Amino acid sequence: MNAPLDVLIAGAGPAGTTLAIDLARRGLAVRVVDKAPHSFEGSRAKGIQPRTLEVFDDLGVLGDVLAGSSDYPRLGIHLGPLTLPWRMFRNRDRSTDVPYPNTRLMPQYRTDAVLHDRLEQLGGKVEYGRELTAFEQDGSSVTATVTGDAGTERITARYLVGADGGSSAVRKLLGLGFLGETHEQDRMLIVDAVTDGLSRDRWHIWPGVRGRFAGACPLPGTELFQWMIRLAPDEEPPEGEEGVTRRIRAHTGNRHIAVRDVRWRSVFRPNIRLAEAYRRGRVFLAGDAAHVHTPAGAQGLNTGIQDAYNLGWKLAQVLAGADPWLLDSYEAERLPIAAGVLGLSTKKYAGIAKLDPSSLRRGKDEQQLSLTYHGGPLAPAGTDRTTTLQVGDRAPDADLGGSRLFDIFRGPHFTLVAYGSKAAAASDELGWPATGAPLRRITVDGPGSFRRAYGVEGDTLLLVRPDGYLGHIATRDFLASTREAVRTMIPEVPA
């Protein structure tokens, strides 16, 4: 008899696979089904933000991501015979608190492949050609109907997560509204193809009248460019290599450009939508199933990955015996983030159509390092803080002299960081359950990058959640306040 399934995930894109990796490394029984016959083959979402790089560091895939990606190239904005150089990002040097400061460029099919490889290393796999068509739930489980070439299977799991894209079957079966708009007349042709007659040291942009533009981004480690061609409202998208080449030449005026060996083609319509809820009972939404964005700002993939990173440890903790209320914090923390990101990417996309130069720039808002859960259910306002950080903020990296804080954070555990003797004594005394995520305790002494990054001035006890956000800060009343803060995040501690 098979062991009972903990979580069934519908959708094997970046969000669904990130969740599966996080759950698998926690020892949970997980299955991932995807209705596609094979993995995604296009470049689509290609920007990986610094905060997502930190997530990938924790999940054990950062090396492969850095090897398969590059920094963003400069833009070359073609204005008739002139080419205006423009830097989308101001590349920053790494620092002790931000080790991966720059956005990386990597086609989505390669991101998917890296994540799928990691899942297989952990003993999991993606079941392609398996479509979720129905489900029912009760107080203890969800039973889904999954169909494929081999027939129909009924799969029962403690929880179901729909990470199955903007047309999510899970969201539709839940009856949840997908609030927002789709611009049916605003279409963009996306083509991945080998391109002759174009240098690979630039992301080429050709502005046009009435917001029409064409762009060609070189995809690292390949001969391919991702072409983005904004179509007129009544224009039929060109077909085939010759048709696409003619369309590009007509817009750019460059008769030397030619595309060949088209690997992927899609017609994109800007969708700006947000699910009215992220959960019904034992069923959750993550990634594009919960929110869809314009492509501007490289936000959609990154926001979906961080949905999964937020949800994974909470599912595992509740399965280990923590209060089920913890799962309510998923929507409370992530839905406002998605709403803000939707506003950002929509503003950027509208600005590109108007040739607003500021819309081509990318900064700290897009990098998602400053996103915070402060004021949410796990990070109430009015609690202790340091000079630089509040509960709910990202926990920065720091040099500890021979090791890094991120080295200590890496893994599916909580971390308790004590600064000063009183905080260290309280850390030693804090009880912790034998089930669920373990607790790693460290004491930091003396001056250095930790004190600067964390803004500590005296004895301080900091609890870092498994997803790298501050779950508690205590500058006084160390033991009692920390016990109260962790009570909602862990199984009950024996007396």
Image (tube, rainbow, N blue to C red):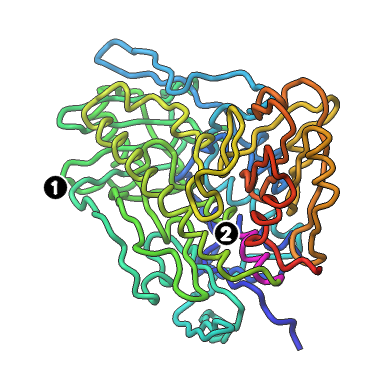
Q: What stretch is highlighted in magenta?
A: 312-320
Separation (CA) of disc 2 from disc 1: 42 Å
The relative height of residue 436 versus residue 174 in the rendered view (above or below) is above
Q: Position of residue 193 (x, y in %)?
A: 44, 39
State whether residue 125 is above or below residue 99: below
Q: Which of 457 and 120 is in front in this view?
A: 457
The amino acid at mark 2 is: Leu
Residue 401 among magenta residues? no
Q: What element carries label 1?
A: loop
Residue on which disc 1 sits: 234
Local packing at callout 2 (Cα closer than 10 Å; few below 14, some 14-19, many 20+) is many
Quadrant, the C terminus: bottom right
Task: Answer above or below: position of 432 versus 281.
Answer: above
Task: Check disc 1 and give the amino acid type.
Answer: Asp
Image quarter hosting the N terminus: bottom right
Quick check: is 317 in the magenta stretch? Answer: yes
**Label 1: few (<14), some (14–19) or many (≥20) C-alpha neighbours in 10 Å:** few
Q: Nearer the viewer, residue 201 or 198?
A: 201
- Where residue 335 sits, quadrant-wise, is bottom left
Residue occupying image coordinates x 43% and y 38%: 260
Please name the residue that numbered disc 2 is placed on.
311
x and y percent of residue 282 in the render? Answer: 52, 75
Q: From the image, state whether disc 2 or disc 1 is nearer to you.
A: 2
Which label's residue is closer to the chain start, 2 or 1? 1
